[in-house]
Image (cartoon, rainbow, N blue to C red):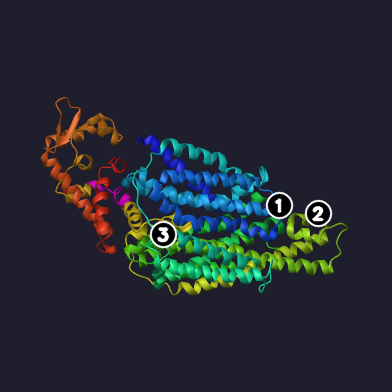
Amino acid sequence: MRQRDVGLIIIALMLGMLLAALDQTIVSTALPTIVGDLGGLDHLSWVVTAYILASTVSTPLWGKLGDQYGRKRLFISAIVIFLTGSALCGLSGSMGELIAFRALQGLGGGGLMVLAQAVVGDVVSARDRGRYQGYFGGVFAVASIVGPLLGGLFVDQLSWHWVFYVNLPLGVIALLVITSVLPSDRSRTRHTVDYAGVVLLGGATSCLVLMASWGGTIYPWASPVIVGLAVASVALLAGWVVAERRAREPVLPLELFRNRAFAMSSAVGFVVGFTLFGALTYLPLYLQVVHGVSATLSGVYLLPMMAGTLTLSIVSGRIISRTGKYRVLPITGTGIATVGMFLLSTLDQTSSMLTLGLYLLVFGVGIGMVMQVLVIVVQNAVAFKDLGVATSGATFFRSIGGSFGVAVLGAVFTGRLAQDVREVLARTPLPPGFDPAGVQRDPTTIQRLPPGVAAEFLQVYADSIALVFRVAAPIMLVAFLFSWFIPEYRLRETTKATDLGEGLGATSAERSSLEEVERGLVRLADADLRRGYYAKLGDLAGLEGMRPEGVWIIARLGGKGWVSAAGLAGRAHVSRERGRPYADQLVVDGFLERSPDGEMLRLTERGQEAALRLLRISREALSRLIADWGPHPQLEQLLDRVAPELLGAAADRPR
């Protein structure tokens, strides 16, 4: 493929992933305005839950079907579903419609996240893949920071509908590029897709979330609806256990739960997702209703939490890479996050924005020390055969925790709000014609009340939101207790290369065990190849005194016949005049020969022998990076495939 086409494809893939990642957070600052327009404050949490739940549960299907039927075709389908959902969300005339269309949008968003990363492997060489993986990790970081801020800007400058409409022009650009430029991938991997496991697990999770959301608020706990949901969830979970025991490729193998590191990390991840998304959903409501700030400013005031999370995610990864120790981080992080949540529970209508910012920073710092580390813990604790599914399982539980957190804390909020509103109505005289129920449907009606009455209702909202944090704080404390049971093992080399996408993304990954190892291997190799690698490689191969540029040429031409001199210079991104002295020296030393017209180059027998030595040494170095996974035929095949791809790449040419 032409380099220009590869660049266009990467931009389109990153754009698609950015849209899907943004829609996890961009809607949070728009929710108060959406509720003011559509009503249905008691259903607010489902605008967030529907998206996360749909994207998380559908992830395994997108990954498997992409392998089986072609990733280009499936990625196009994901874009179309996502854009359709986005358009319908913007056109929604009721909260029920918006929730349904958010689920459709989440279905497409899950495919965008999973398939965008998979397509990179189809269009980018192994040598360049590590760099692009870092870019995709950065997309998640950008989305987590700017999502709430963008949501507020659209609400203030345009309308809440544009939170969803903005996806359309950007998504269409990505769709056109992928359709016209991305070649069809002809390789297919047959899977026995665990449809039963996906459906049963998704159904059980949905029933549990509905039960937690409706119980004690919309329906009494003993009502037929809640009891029916409880029975259905138990039956679906039992069916899922049976299905997983029989499935050839289970969506989540049951034997993983016997691994203490996986079980404890999944439990901690569930609680972290629970509290993080719960806090992110209700903080804008507190800011916009209680303090009367604009939607844009409510996004600005959330920045300390996002900045703390991002910064400590980066710092935690570097600490682990340098020390090889990781257990102390989730213990410390969950402890700090628990303190932060307890601090947030003290907020009221008189709290200053500086106080709020400091509390959010504490909470964000704690979360940042945990999220990425949990993926590393799981990857480091399982055998090679379980690596892929264990990684996706760890992020799956964090996402499901987010769904539960938003729903459960939403039920806590609406239940307390209804109770406090009744108490205010019983003791406060109201203006003629005022609809008391409107305060619960639309919080903006408070602004039209006399100051004394409005202060009463603002206190009600402040108390209800503070209760959300008071409930979340002891739940976060449970994560702190669980984190002490996470064991620590010697850190595998490839697990050090986990990127921010794994730590900040709310959608679970879906890669095979081999793809997980390759992902880490190429990122480690990317770092090594930039540190005078060819000078060291030449010395190890017995080419003492040879310039690194000459070693690169030999590695590049190894195993090839006649190669155009102009093409080789173009591959190195230098002029022929600049590269000629190095080629001439190789000719003098007997490693290289020129065609009679001087336009073609070819290694001599001596040069090919040197190229084989370089390849052997490079393969041995790579094998040491994955030796701690133990011997496995797939890993041997990986080394045979990746070692030649890494040598002589344009990205690491000596400069």
From the viewer's side, name the closer residue of 426 and 149. Answer: 426
N-terminal of the pair, mark 3 or mark 1, is: 1
The reply to whether the magenta stretch includes residue 309 is: no
Residue 38's label in the rendered image is: 1
User: Gap in Å between the C-alphas at discs 3 and 1?
Assistant: 43 Å
User: Gap in Å between the C-alphas at discs 3 and 2?
Assistant: 50 Å
Residue positioned most to the top: 597
Q: Is residue 547 visible?
A: yes
Question: Relative to residue 10, is residue 470 drawn left or right?
Answer: right
Q: Amino acid at mark 2?
A: Arg
From the viewer's side, name the closer residue of 437 and 598. Answer: 437
Q: Give the percent coordinates (x, y) of residue 93.
A: 69, 48
Residue 448's label in the rendered image is: 2
**Image quadrant containing the N terminus:** top left
Dominant secondary structure of the residues highlighted in magenta in the image: helix
Q: Where are the magenta residues, as a range?
A: 525-534
Q: Give the percent coordinates (x, y) of residue 524.
A: 32, 54
Residue at position x 32%, y 56% from top?
A: 514
N-terminal of the pair, mark 3 or mark 2, is: 3
Residue at position x 29%, y 33% from top?
A: 570
Where 101 sits versus 595, above or below?
below
The reply to whether the magenta stretch includes residue 527 is: yes
